[in-house]
Amino acid sequence: MAESAQLDIPRLLSRQPTTWLAFGGTVVAVLAMAGWAVATETGVNQVMAGLVVAATVVAVAAVVWRRTWLDTGDGTLHHRVAFLPERRVAWAQATTVDLERNRAGQLALRARGERGTVRVTLLADDLGGERSAGPDLLRVLADEIDRWAPERRRLTARLRAQADHVESGGAPRESPLARHL
């Protein structure tokens, strides 16, 4: 039996400080306005302001508490968001394993199975700047897909080509996967 290991898959976060300032400023502004309404309003307005505070806290939790990981022991890709049920897809039982663009400048590896769909963002050229997943992660994903779903060689060849491009210092916009954006 293969040795099981959990490999955390890092998120492809924005490198632009303005993105983070805008996000933080929006959260602070919403909480300040809702807090002011809770303190100064009465009745239904106060209840609604309290609900806005609660919804904002839940939304921030969903953005911050995300985790995607790969279990190499059974070839399963997992994704968990805050309080929601975990989604997982085994490479061998996946109905779909392919690249998917989100039409907003990001390209993800999408695995769909009985227990949901899990996406791993591999490449982005959006408001957050140009960025690509690291070569080590790309190779591990390719190796695991080859191990558990060997019929997907075309996809793993693309992942390995991207890994070689990133490792040689190539720009994400000129990478092999960029044509799929």
Image (tube, grey):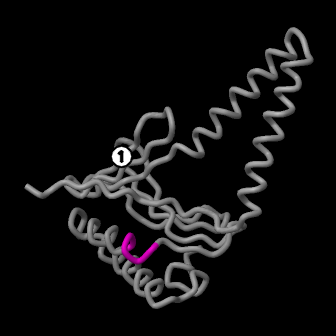
Q: Nearer the viewer, residue 129 or 102?
A: 129
Which residue is located at x 27 percent, y 71 percent?
A: 143
Which residue is located at x 49 percent, y 84 percent?
A: 176
Q: Name the residue furthest left.
A: 1
Q: Which quadrant does the C terminus fall into? A: bottom right
Residue type highlighted by circle 1: Arg
Q: Name the residue furthest right.
A: 40
Locate residue 92, reporting x and y percent: 24, 57
Q: Height in image: 108 above or below 174?
A: above
- Please say whether residue 64 is one of the residues in the magenta stretch: no
Magenta residues (range): 134-138
Locate residue 30, reporting x and y percent: 81, 37
Which residue is located at x 29 percent, y 52 percent?
A: 76
Q: Height in image: 96 above or below 45?
A: below
Q: Which residue is mark 1?
A: 88
Locate residue 45, reporting x and y percent: 87, 16
Which residue is located at x 51 percent, y 79 percent?
A: 177
Left or right of residue 124: residue 177: left
Does dot 1 land on a helix, a strand or a loop?
A: strand
Main SS, magenta residues:
helix
Give the quarter of the image for residue 114: top left
